[in-house]
Amino acid sequence: MLVLIRAARSLSAVLLVGLLFLLASPVLRLVVIPGAWLFPRQRFRLVSLFMKGICSGIFGLLRLGGARVRRVGSLPTATPILIVANHQALLDICQITLLAQPRVPAFVARRRYARFVPLVSACIRLLGSPIVDPRRDVPGAVAAIRRGARELPHGILIFPEGHRSRDGEIRPFRTAGIEAVLTERRMPVYLVLNEGVWRVRRLADLLFRVHLIDAHSEVLGPFEPPADDARLSSFVRGLREALVARLALIRSGSTTPLAD
């Protein structure tokens, strides 16, 4: 019986999230996008307010389905920063959206998300996110990331594992994107450790398993990149090691994740 109650509660929460998307779409189409076009200097403010509202609503509804959500720290996006995060589930971007203050950073997005994904695709374009296809066009992906590093005023987010982790462990980093950003423009680097959502890594996993979400996202840093390009590879390895060490510490129970 408990299993059925959890499944029903989870499905109800997911359906409410779908309703939230339906209700938010006219706001995006009739307010945010026209506002960004009419007042280009307010573009990042408008899309940040919209995304933060949506992400807060998503987590509020998922909590009704039994999810637990925590965030620790903040990402100072008033000036350009590089954010490097491990990737467990679609909810990671929502967590980082709410950690960022005052603006939402752009994030490196695969080409398949740039069109026809409700709300997401439009936000990708409004943020000016670098759109990449690393399998078919590696040079083009690096060029897009370098251009983003030069032009984006509120930072850039990279998930260097390339794919969501199937078991929550931190996969090897693909370092080209991070090195491209820091070669183009030295900026402070912040890490975000995401934990507790790998069991719901896909949208389909959410339907009856919202109660398995125990999301914890934590900011580490800042880390100052080396001035010498030759030391960037070792610097990036150190970033991954810092995330791996923090994840191991949390999972061992040696430290308790702080509540927000």
Image (cartoon, grey):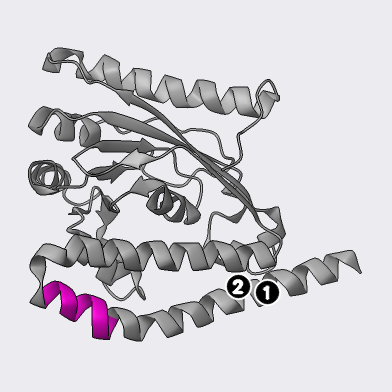
Residue located at (30% from left, 50% from top): 102
Q: In this view, does 214 lie to the left or right of 189?
A: right
Kind of residue sitting beneath label 1: Leu
Residue 258 image position (x, y, % from top left):
60, 34
Q: In the rendering, which numbered label is found on residue 11?
A: 1
Q: In the rendering, which numbered label is found on residue 14?
A: 2
Residue located at (24% from left, 28% from top): 188
Residue 34 image position (x, y, % from top left):
17, 80
Q: In this view, does 245 lie to the left or right of 176?
A: right
Residue located at (45% from left, 37% from top): 73
User: Looking at the image, which is closer to me, 112 or 219?
Assistant: 219
| 104 to 29, vertically: above or below | above
Asked whether disc 1 touches disc 2, contact meaning CB atoms under 8 Å apart, the reply is yes
Residue 129 image position (x, y, % from top left):
21, 55
Question: Residue 172 lies in what quarter of the image?
Answer: top left
- Per the image, label 1 sits on a secondary structure element best described as helix
Residue 130 visible in this rendered orientation of the protein: yes
Residue located at (53% from left, 24% from top): 246
Residue 227 image position (x, y, % from top left):
13, 15
Q: Give the crowd class for mark 2: few <14, some 14-19, many >=20 residues within 10 Å.
A: many
User: Looking at the image, which is closer to me, 72 or 19?
Assistant: 72
Q: Is residue 31 magenta?
A: yes
Question: Residue 47 lies in what quarter of the image?
Answer: bottom left
Kind of residue sitting beneath label 2: Val
Residue at the limit of the structure toward the right, as seen here: 1
- Per the image, label 2 sits on a secondary structure element best described as helix
Q: Give the crowd class for mark 1: few <14, some 14-19, many >=20 residues within 10 Å.
A: some
Q: Main secondary structure of the magenta part?
A: helix
| 67 to 151, vertically: above or below | below
Quarter of the picture containing the C terminus is top right
Q: Give the range drawn in magenta.
A: 29-37
Quarter of the picture containing the N terminus is bottom right
